[in-house]
Image (cartoon, rainbow, N blue to C red):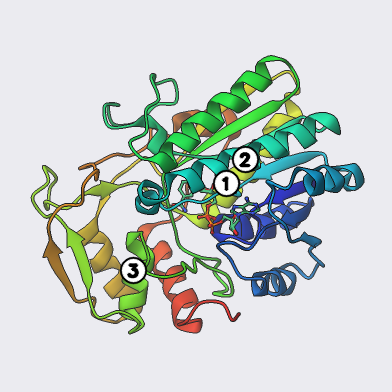
Amino acid sequence: MRVLVTGGAGYIGSHTVVQLVAAGHQPVVVDSFVNSRPSVIARLEELTGEQIETHSFDLRDADKTSALFAEGGFDAVIHFAGLKAVGESSQIPLEYYDNNLGATFSLVEAMRRHGVRTIVFSSSATVYGEAAPVPYVEDYEPLAASSPYGRTKVMQERILSDVAATGELQVALLRYFNPVGAHPSGRIGEDPQGVPNNLMPFIAQVAVGRRQRLQVFGDDYPTPDGTPLRDYIHVEDLAAGHVAALEHLAAHPDLAVRAWNLGGGRGTSVLEMITAFEAASGRPIPYEIAPRRAGDLAAFWADATRAETELGWRAERTIEQMCADTWRWQSGNPQGYPG
Ligand SMILES: NC(=O)c1ccc[n+]([C@@H]2O[C@H](COP(=O)([O-])OP(=O)(O)OC[C@H]3O[C@@H](n4cnc5c(N)ncnc54)[C@H](O)[C@@H]3O)[C@@H](O)[C@H]2O)c1
């Protein structure tokens, strides 16, 4: 399939591009580079041995988006593009609603106009909100996120589902848990701009000497060691989940819309992750206990059985592999991607 990958220069999109090529598909990247570097593309070409057709513009530009589809000959879309920092979304909510919803409107309108039906959408476990019982199951309602970022995901899920109900779209809603890790080559990985919001890139930057110490936000949660439990998933497993979902939609043209959790189905604590990273890197990770962060939940993880039963997909990689691959990327690229 010829697949348009929006946000294909970003962390998860770049890993998915490599796996699409490996699976015999032809990815085409569109990215505004608002949160990624153009030099990613050269790394993707190095890893795949293919030229990666890349278009650099903001998807909210409806004319350019429509023109891309007019020429594109796409069979399907994987839609990663969006702003994703939970904390920042409370400071600049309008930018989050405008970017994330605006990009989706423009994209879906172009798909409709040019007869492309199939879309795999990057959703998040954040759509389950604070009241959902753990483990999270896909049929849980009502979806209710606790940040503007999360609400853009709930809204995009609703918009895509409503259009799917008309028969004009076929939609996979992939709800990611906590993506970490990097391609085993160490050539592509997570490269946050500024201070990392997530645990793993922060740990990696401490290990490589870019930051002095990690803050652990709360050690008095009702968990075995008092620190929060999260369901970490290796980005390579996550990328494979996209290929599986894409191929599932192609094989089931009557399927209108379906949500799948992409998680490992178990929780790992912050302290367990620090210990595993120290072992993988051979570096100490100095940390201090800081107050809890507003909005952080004690523990959640996926019920991942639906993806296994229906997509034949399962998270395979261990916490040790997540740490080893992150370290290979971070130690080989201490300052992230060049320009
Ligand atoms: N990384 C996570 O922890 C996580 C968890 C759950 C869901 N997600 C979702 O998965 C998707 C990919 O996440 P990621 O971690 O790879 O993020 P990322 O920021 O690395 O990648 C997103 C890419 O989209 C591009 N982009 C943003 N707005 C755009 C626009 N209007 N037009 C064109 N390009 C645009 C950015 O430049 C970037 O390259 C996002 O939608 C994110 O919300 C991520």
Q: Is residue 339 above or below residue 106?
A: below
Q: Which residue is mark 1?
A: 99
Q: Which residue is mark 3?
A: 202
Numbered label tally? 3
For marks 1 and 3 on the same chain, the one whose residue lies earlier in the sequence: 1
Q: Amino acid at mark 2?
A: Gly
What crowding class fits label 3: few (fewer than 14 Cα within 10 Å), some (14-19), or many (20 or more)?
some
Report whether residue 247 is seen: no
Q: Is residue 215 left or right of residue 277?
A: left
Q: Position of residue 220 (x, y in %)?
A: 8, 50
**Whether the residue under disc 1 has CB within 8 Å of ligand 1:** yes
Q: Which residue is mark 2?
A: 102
- CA–CA distance in space, label 1 to label 3: 26 Å
Quarter location, residue 279 = bottom left
Q: Is residue 115 left or right of residue 86?
A: right
Q: Are marks 1 and 2 in contact (CB under 8 Å)?
A: yes
